[in-house]
Image (spheres, grey):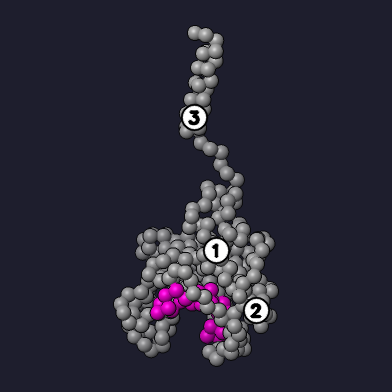
Amino acid sequence: MPRQNLTKSFALRLAALGSVLAILLPLSPAPAQAYACGRSSGCTSFELVSAGASYNWYPLVWRYEFKGGRKAPKQWDLSGAGREYQQNGMLTIVGNKGVHAKPVASTWSNVAYTQGRWESRMRTRTYGAGQHFRVQLALTPATKAARHCGAQDVTFLDYTPARKNTYHVEAHTLPAATFTYSKKLGRQIGDDEWHVFGVEVTKKHIAWFVDAHLVSLEDRPAALSGTAFTMQARLVPVDGASMEKTRLQLDWARYWSMKKKGRALGSAPSPTQHVNKTAC
């Protein structure tokens, strides 16, 4: 065989061997926190649709991934006349059909901070054609004595099923201040549509996020209580009314500190200030 053909044949064999080795040999592991979602193995499309990934908040301080089965999760405490269990990797909270006087709420215990970033991937569903619970994700004071009937909560989702596309948030401070903002989203919140809702609380501002986008920003001192917060998911009835079954599910819940600066927030509409008459 001519020398030129031998050289060409050898090159082809080397190329083939390289292809086989690329398939058989494992890739070198990526360094920890190498990706925007904080996972060294990479990010799914769902994980990238989050403020944590988009604004570069990682690494996490707390991460709660729910499991299967029907057991209630540790660190999530239920109150009110409803049900709580884990199902297919989700926290499931159900407000049952009937008359309810108090919210059905699940609180993330032992995760309390005055500042930081909280975010959760959530969906909700209603049953029947009557009146349904409002669905809320909120930061509530870690101690019950500081809650004052919600007068120090920071709500990062307040959804009324009758208004399928409307996203609403609030911040409350004592003695009687409330800051509210509403936005109509391009797709509905209910009917098992997944969304990611988040909030950032610092000494200088509160910022609210939906599906990786900043939607509202509040920096007036009157909106900043300095309270230690924990996350709470809840179903809120019309007091004394007969409610239809309503369900909310959390895929995950996360908390980041403010140690990492992250990407600049930019600008967003400010909430409107009102007088709060519900404090107790």
Quarter of the rendering containing residue 180: bottom right
- Distance from Cα at disc 2 to Cα at disc 1: 23 Å
Q: Nearer the viewer, mark 2 or mark 3?
A: 3
Whichever of labels 2 and 1 marks the residue nearer the N terminus, that label is 1
Quarter of the rendering containing residue 88: bottom left
User: From which residue to which does the magenta span run?
Assistant: 148-172
Element type where label 3 sits in the image: helix
Element type where label 1 sits in the image: loop
Q: Which residue is mark 1?
A: 212
Whether residue 114 is visible, yes or no, is no
Q: Is residue 153 above or below residue 257?
A: below
Mark 3 Cα shell of 10 Å, populated few (<14), some (14-19), many (≥20) = few
Mark 2 Cα shell of 10 Å, populated few (<14), some (14-19), many (≥20) = many
Tell me what residue is drawn at x 41 percent, y 86 percent: 238
Whether residue 185 is visible, yes or no, is yes
Element type where label 2 sits in the image: loop
Tell me what residue is drawn at x 50 percent, y 32 percent: 22
Quarter of the rendering containing residue 205: bottom right
- Which amino acid type is marked by label 3? Ser
Q: Which residue is mark 3?
A: 19
Q: Nearer the viewer, residue 269 or 130?
A: 269
Whichever of labels 2 and 3 marks the residue nearer the N terminus, that label is 3
- Image quadrant for the C terminus? bottom right
Q: Is residue 97 above or below residue 90?
A: below
Q: Position of residue 81 (x, y in %)?
A: 38, 79
Q: Are marks 3 and 1 in contact (CB under 8 Å)?
A: no
